Amino acid sequence: MTVQAYVNLNAAESSPTAGLGDELETTSGAVYKYVQASAAVDAFSLCRVTATNTIAESTATDLTTTRPAVVGIPQFALAQGQYGWVPVGPFTLREDGVTTFKVLSKVANASVVLYGTATAGSVDDAVTNPAIRGLTLTAACSVDDTATACIAVSRLTVN
């Protein structure tokens, strides 16, 4: 893990302030990876982290063809080319110890296995391929593509 005096975990940056692929662990135990957006990314979108530490919103098809993969869920929007710290798991609460992490979800139940979907950046509990290992919603989602509270009990991966 890389140690830095201050990092901005809450916004995208136009110029790099860390090395691509650097990781850090917050005092709350959340693990983040420093990445660059290869395309525009909406806040709370499920994204695949490539070998070159770029991200883009993922679909079930993308995740299926690029396994194994590490995935992350930026908690803010990034424009193409911007940099930022993306949680890759494990994580439970944000650095303030109160705010939850969120992911875009289709209508889904809490505490069940989540899967990639045809909608870029969104997850669902409908059994499709591939499963997002380590990710679960902490509240049910009743409206498609809603930012929903979640936790990661381990590194987020697709195998």
Image: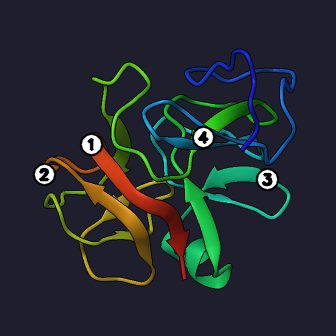
Q: CA distance from mark 4 to mark 3?
A: 11 Å
Which picture quadrant has residue 113? bottom left
Secondary structure beneath label 4: strand
**Mark identifier at residue 148:** 1
Where is residue 81 drawn, in percent x and y?
82, 35
Q: What's the residue type where badge 3 is placed?
A: Asn
At which x and y percent is residue 27?
49, 30
Residue 35 is tagged as none
Closer to the chain start, of discs 2 and 4, is: 4
Q: Are marks 1 and 2 in contact (CB under 8 Å)?
A: yes
Looking at the image, which residue is at 53% across and 28% down?
A: 76
Q: What residue is disc 2 on? A: 140
Give the residue number, with chain letter if any, for mark 3.
53
Mark 1 / mark 4, whichever is N-terminal? 4
Task: Count neighbours of disc 2 (C-alpha within 10 A) and say few if under 14, some if 14 to 19, many if 20 or more.
Answer: some
Quarter of the image containing the N terminus?
top right
Q: CA distance from mark 3 to mark 2?
A: 31 Å
Answer with mark 3 or mark 1, whichever residue precedes in sequence: 3
- Residue sitting at the far top: 6
User: Amino acid type of disc 1?
Assistant: Thr
Between marks 1 and 2, how big is the CA–CA gap? 8 Å
The percent position of residue 43, horizontal first and vertical second, equals 49, 34
| 93 versus 113 height, above or below | above
Query: Is 65 rendered above or below residue 122?
Result: below
Residue at 51% over, 57% down: 120
Query: For numbered disc 2, what is the local secondary structure?
Result: loop
